[in-house]
Image: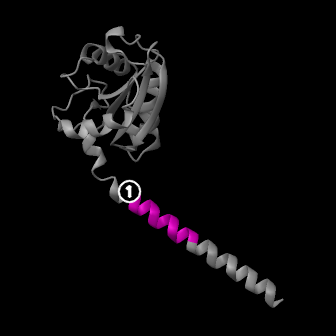
Amino acid sequence: MDTKKFFITTIALSLAAHIVVLALVGFLAHTGDTDTEEVYTVTFEKQPDRTAAAQEEEQEPKALLENIRSRARGGSVDTVDLDNTETKYYPYLLQVKERIDRQWSYPEDSFTRGEVGTTVVEFSIAREGNLAACRAVASSGHPSLDAESLRAIQSAAPFAPLSEEFGLARLNIVAKFRYTLAD
C-alpha cells in the first residue's frame, strides 16, 4: 500500500512540475514576442458598416523587415509586407490586396458582441499563383476575427502567377487585419 501511495504522489508532483514549467515557457514566449508586432506593417481596417478599408500610413524601419527576409534567404523566396509601395512587387501586391479586400468582411456575430482586434497573417503564394501556406502569426484575441482573416485570404486564392521578372518560387506576404468599431 505504501508503494502505491508513493507512486501516486510522485506522479502528482511530476504533473504539477510539468504544468508550472509549461506555464513559465508560455509566459516567457509571450513576453519575448512584444517586439515582433513591430515587424508587420500591412494594414487592413474593416469598419462594421462595410465601408472601404482604411490604410494605416506608418512605415516600419527597413531593418525590421530585413529580419523577416533573412529567414527566407538561400532560395528563390522573398518575404514582403503587403503595403510596401517601395518594392518591385508593388503592382502585384496591390492586386493581391484588392482580391483579399473583396472577400473580407466583419463577422456579424463579432460585431454584435463588440469584438475588436488585429490579426496578423503570414501567407505564401507559389509561382503559379496558388496559396502555398496561410497562418495567423498573432491573434486578435477573438477566434471569429482570426478565422475571418484566414478565410478572406483563402477565398481570394488563387492569385495571379508570380512574374518571371521576380525570379521567385514563392512570395511570403505578411498582413494585418484590423477590426475596429466606429466611434
As drawn, 148 above or below 92: below
Quadrant of the frame with the N terminus? bottom right
Q: Name the chief secondary structure element in magenta.
A: helix
Residue 12 percent across, percent down from the top left: 66, 77
Crowd rating for badge 1 (residues with CA inside 10 Å; few <14, some 14–19, many 20+)? few
Q: Which residue bears the numbered disc 1?
A: 30
Which image quadrant is residue 19 in? bottom right
What element does badge 1 sit on? helix
Residue closest to the eye, 108 or 85: 85
Q: Residue 28: say if magenta.
A: yes
Extreme residue toward the right, this view? 1
Which image quadrant is residue 116 in? top left
The reply, left or right, for residue 128 in relation to residue 52 is right
Type of residue at label 1?
Answer: His
Which image quadrant is residue 122 in? top left
Residue 59 percent across, percent down from the top left: 16, 34
Q: Residue 84: say if magenta.
A: no
Q: Residue at x 36, y 38 (%)?
A: 120
Q: Is residue 106 visible?
A: yes
Residue closest to the eye, 167 or 38: 167
Q: Which residues are magenta?
A: 18-29
